[in-house]
Every structure is written in structure tokens, then in C-alpha cells.
Image (cartoon, grey):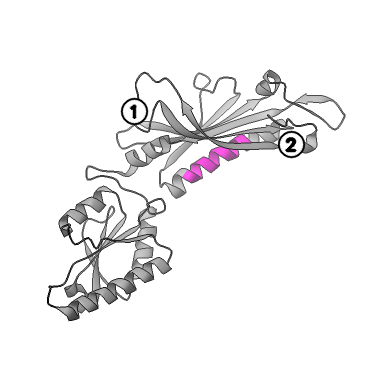
Amino acid sequence: LSTPPQSRSDLPLKINQWANVMRWEMRTRPFLRTSEFLWQEGHTAHATYEGAFDDSKTMMEEYASLAEELLAIPVVRGVKSPSERFAGAEETFTIEALMQNGWALQSGTSHFLGQSFGKAFDVTFQDAEGKQQDVWGTSWGVSTRLLGALIMTHSDDAGLVLPPRVAPVQVVIVPIAAKKNDEEAKAALEKSLDDLTAGLKAKGLRVKVDDRDYVRNGAKYFEWERKGVPLRIELGPRDVANGVCVFKYRAGKEDKESVSLEEATEAAVSGLDDLQL
């Protein structure tokens, strides 16, 4: 600690950091166990046992919330056995995610360190009676292993499946071009495309219009499916004439569905919320 606590009023002290970590792994696995990875870690110092113990359990719940609510990964909360416990810790709380292949993947840990690290590094504070006391500590962290958990939990043989809340592109719109000489159909398609895009963005959705004219529509569908975009919307001259567009979700629903252009924005928001859950 660059500025160690002096008295009880300086506690609790909480430090969060992001750091690249290097480990000499004999056998690496992409995202799950790599030689170098990005790690979020926190360290705290408390005046009481209760403060540190409660903080370590709270962080387990924070990580569980991150996994379940943002990444849509169900996890089991638990306590490590003494043989699996972090060295020097009195308790290690963990969240474990179940992968599609039946593996349980440790996805985040929070350690109640007791006073062992305070004693080892001589981190003390002055209590209300003026006596020097060792701090009670916690340590907790998650890493880019969560990306591996995300991929292994949701994806399939066709590629990535990304939960809407973390997908860089939540909706991709693929316009199907009108015939070259049909100016009226082109104008109608462009207006419907602009209105649909604006409506989706107004709802806070991250939208991409794939209007590349040098890529076949089938290739576009395959590309965005492989990238895991949660919702693809197809819009062509015939759809515009009928006042509809076509929804295709990456997961959850096998078939395409025809949706009214007037209701498409609300339907997309509702559908992505359902997909997240």
C-alpha cells in the first residue's frame, strides 16, 4: 500500500485494479487458461472480522450478478474446500458455471483473508483504544476467462451466440435491393430502412445496416450468424409493399417471423429482452 491506513477512520480501504498477468502455463486453452490474460482484482482492508467477511461474500454476489444478468451465464455460488482454497485465505467463495460439455468452470473468486496478510505485510491501524491492530483483509477477482465461459455457455456449431446486453451489434438489418430500374421501389425501401433504423436506435439498440452491394445476401446471413448478432432483420421491396419486415433471431427461435413495420421497434426490444433471459 502506498498510503497504509493510520487509524480506524481510514478503514475500510478498498482498491480495485485491472492488470495484465503472465503465468508460465505448460498447457494453454484459449480464454480459459492462457499464458497472459487481463485480470480485474480488488483488495480491501477492514477494522473488523465482520466487515471483511461480509465484503468477501458481497463480492461473490457481485460476480454472480455480472455473470447472470449481463452475460446470461447461470452460476452456482459456493465455498471452496480447504484443499482448493486460496493459499493463506480462511475462506474462498466462488461462482461456478456449467458448460455445455458438462464441465464446471470456476468463473470468479472472492477470498476472506482473515488477518494473515495484514500480519505478513505489517499493515496495521490504531483502534479506538489507541492500540495497533492488524487489518482484516479480502481479495477478489475475475479475468478474461469469462469470455471463454460466454462462448462455451451459449455458442453452437454455427458460431458465436452473444447475449444482447454484451453484443457489440444487437440488430443487423440486411436490405434486399430493389430491381435496378424500379426507382419507386428503391425510394420506398430507403425510406422504410431509414425509419426502421432510426426507431431502433431511438430505443437505445446498437444497429448495423449491412448494405454492401458486393456481398450476396446469403453470405451476409452466414457472416452475422457466425458473429453471434442476436437479431437479423431482412427488408426487401416486397416486404415494404406489405408493410412488414422479417425477423430472424440467432437463438431461441428456429423460424423466421414476419413483423409489421409499425410494430418492429417494440417487437425487437421485447424479443431481445426475452433472448437475454
Quadrant into which the N terminus falls: top right
Identify the image quadrant of residue 123: top right
Mark 1 neighbour density, 10 Å: few (under 14) some (14–19) many (20 or more): few
Tell me if residue 163 comes above or below residue 150 in the rendering.
below
Instruction: Indicate which disc, 1 or 2, sits on the residue closer to the N terminus.
Output: 2
Q: Is residue 60 magenta?
A: yes
Expressed as whole percent of the image width and height from the top left, the position of residue 22 reads 46, 25
Mark 2 sits on what residue? 11
Q: How many labels were placed on the picture?
A: 2
One can see residue 44 in this view: yes
Q: Is residue 4 left or right of residue 253?
A: right
Expressed as whole percent of the image width and height from the top left, the position of residue 6 reads 79, 31
Q: Is residue 43 magenta?
A: no
Tell me if residue 99 comes above or below residue 158 in the rendering.
above
One can see residue 242 in this view: no
Picture disc at residue 202: none
Picture disc at residue 29: 1
Give the magenta part as a residue range. 55-66
Q: Please tell me which residue is depicted at 59% across the width and 40% down the height of the picture.
A: 58
* Disc 1 to disc 2, C-alpha distance: 40 Å
Residue type at the position of mark 2: Leu
Tell me if residue 69 comes above or below residue 146 in the rendering.
below
Residue type at the position of mark 1: Arg
Q: Judging from the image, what secondary structure is the residue with disc 2 in?
A: loop
Expressed as whole percent of the image width and height from the top left, the position of residue 266 reads 37, 69
Q: Is residue 220 left or right of residue 171?
A: left
Expressed as whole percent of the image width and height from the top left, the position of residue 148 reads 37, 37
Tell me if residue 40 comes above or below residue 218 in the rendering.
above
Q: Please tell me which residue is depicted at 32% across the width and 71% down the height of the picture.
A: 196
Q: Please tell me which residue is depicted at 39% across the width and 59% down the height of the picture.
A: 273
